[in-house]
Image (spheres, rainbow, N blue to C red):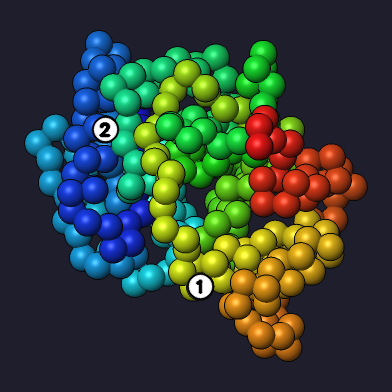
Amino acid sequence: MKITIAVVTYNHGPEEIQTLLDSLIKSIKHTQGSSHVFQLIYINNGNELNLNSDDIKIRKLQSEGNIGYTKACNLILQTAFEQLNQDIVITANPDGMFFYDTLSKTLNFIEKNPHTLIEISQFPEEHPKNYNPITNDVEWASGCCLVFVKSVVEKLGYLDEIFFMYMEDVDYSWRARLNDIPVKICPSAKFGHDVIDRPPPSKKVLEHFLQSGRHLGAKWGCDSFVHFCEDSLISEGVFTSKQEIPSLIDNIKYITNDKSIQVTNFNHHFRFAESRWG
């Protein structure tokens, strides 16, 4: 199979990106003996960054400025599937790292679950959402390290660009389940993503997060979640009143399918699933 690792950067330091790249190469070498061919495609949403390696083919897409994670990720997905005829794209947060056996375990999981949206488990702080330990079914799959197989993208299309950043993975997972595409987590494969003791997000990041929540609630018909996000924008000091909050964007593709209530979960706020702990 032809496999692309997709990375969207935004003002990440060269040492951080080099850690990701070095870990990726080690994980690829652990798959030696297979017929898989790997490449990395990246795009800079922030400061200029150049990646080079003798061990993996690297493609750099032309930066269009800070166009948001979702749009940048779509550019990579479109390039990989439509121009380069790739079979699989695996997104990877630039501040993370692969374990030596991440890819080999992921590929084994894909062989058993071919037409599936698959999350690679995060370490050391695994996402607290619940999943079925027998089937590995999960309500939504995190985009931190996410497997897109071509057949799923051909069925669903690309990520919804109403989400500048955040919640695009929740939306895509719900769209998958709405179309009877399984969403699973591969708990044996690990992607290092240390979010413990990070500083609190800036107001701008918090605004993007809560605005994406508003759009998710509106798209999937949950007015109470839209109001919750708007109240949070005020309580967190992003805006001082609801009159200041921008209107929802015009091109939301509202989900009106009666089955949508079966795939969404707004009861647990931004976890979007029952928690295994905490």
Residue with the most extreme top position: 33
Residue 82 visible: no
Which sits in the foreground, 70 or 198?
Answer: 198
Query: Which amino acid is tagged 2?
Result: Leu
Q: Which residue ends up furthest to the right in the rendered image? A: 258
Residue 2 versus residue 199 in the image, above or below: above
**Mark 1 is on which residue type?**
Lys
- For marks 1 and 2, the one nearer the N-term is 2
Q: Residue furthest left?
A: 54
Along the horizontal axis of the image, is 50 left or right of 93?
left
Give the labeled residue for mark 2: 24
Q: How many marks?
A: 2
| Rendered residue at 42%/48% (across/down) | 197
- The answer to whether 252 appears left or right of 207 in the picture is right
Q: For the residues marked 1 and 2, what is the alpha-carbon distance in whole angstroms?
A: 33 Å
Image coords of residue 42 (percent x, y): 30, 51
What x and y, as percent, mark residue 205?
A: 49, 67
Task: Please state if 126 lies on the left or on the right of 97 as rendered.
Answer: right
Is the residue marked by circle 1 packed among few (<14), some (14-19), or many (20+) residues within 10 Å? some
In the rendered image, residue 278, in percent from the top left (x then y), is placed at 66, 37
Residue 113 picture location, percent across and down = 57, 20
Residue 256 marker:
none
Residue 203: which disc?
A: 1
At mark 2, the secondary structure is helix
Q: Residue at x 26, y 40 (%)?
A: 20
SS at mark 1 in the image:
helix
Q: Nearer the viewer, residue 233 or 225?
A: 233
- Name the residue located 45 percent from the left edge and 38 percent from the top edge: 145
